[in-house]
């Protein structure tokens, strides 16, 4: 019998990370409303979440900078 059969619910949230793994870092920034809207539209057109689209855009700029 598992805990759910005794009325105990499984813990909520994501499972613990393995040793050596880390959560993603957070970056907070302010954007003008029109810029955020354009980013959201571009992400939607690309079939991505805004975070994914922004990470891809940043990666492209960093690659360009590296030459």
Image (spheres, rainbow, N blue to C red):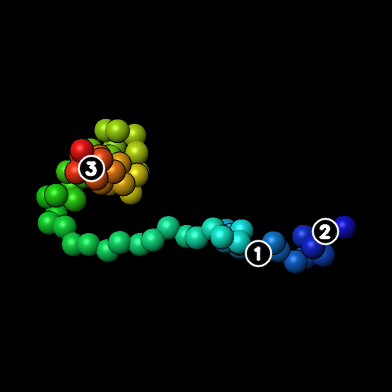
Disc on the earlier residue, 2 or 3 = 2
Residue nearest the viewer, comparing 59 with 13:
59
* Rendered position, 41 above or below 51: above
Labels 2 & 1 near each other (Cβ < 8 A): no
Label 2 packing within 10 angstroms: few (<14), some (14-19), many (20+):
few
Q: Compute the Cα span from label 2 to label 3.
A: 54 Å
Q: Residue at x 82, y 58 (%)?
A: 2
User: Which of the two marks, 2 or 3, is nearer to us in this view?
Assistant: 3
Location of residue 61 (image quadrant): top left
Disc on the earlier residue, 2 or 1 = 2
Q: Which mark is residue 58?
A: none
Task: Report helix, strand or loop for mark 3.
Answer: helix
Q: Compute the Cα span from label 1 to label 3.
A: 45 Å
Q: Which residue is mark 1?
A: 11
Residue nearest the viewer, comparing 30 with 18:
18
Q: Which mark is residue 2?
A: 2
Q: Residue at x 75, y 66 (%)?
A: 8
Label 1 packing within 10 angstroms: few (<14), some (14-19), many (20+):
few
Tell me how many marks there are: 3
Residue nearest the viewer, comparing 45 with 55:
55
Q: Which mark is residue 66?
A: 3
Residue lying farthest right?
A: 1
User: Which of the two marks, 1 or 3, is nearer to us in this view?
Assistant: 3
Q: At which x and y percent is residue 14?
A: 57, 58
Task: Report helix, strand or loop for mark 2.
Answer: loop
Q: At which x and y percent is residue 28?
A: 27, 63
| Residue 57 visible in the displayed image | no
Q: Residue at x 69, y 61 (%)?
A: 10
| Residue 29 visible in the displayed image | yes
């Amino acid at each position: 019998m598992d805990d759910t059969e005794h009325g105990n619910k499984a813990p909520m949230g994501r499972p613990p990370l393995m040793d050596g793994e880390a959560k993603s870092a957070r970056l907070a920034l302010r954007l003008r409303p029109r810029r955020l809207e354009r980013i959201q539209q571009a992400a939607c057109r690309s079939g991505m979440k805004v975070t994914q689209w922004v990470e891809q855009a940043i990666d492209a700029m960093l690659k360009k900078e590296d030459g």
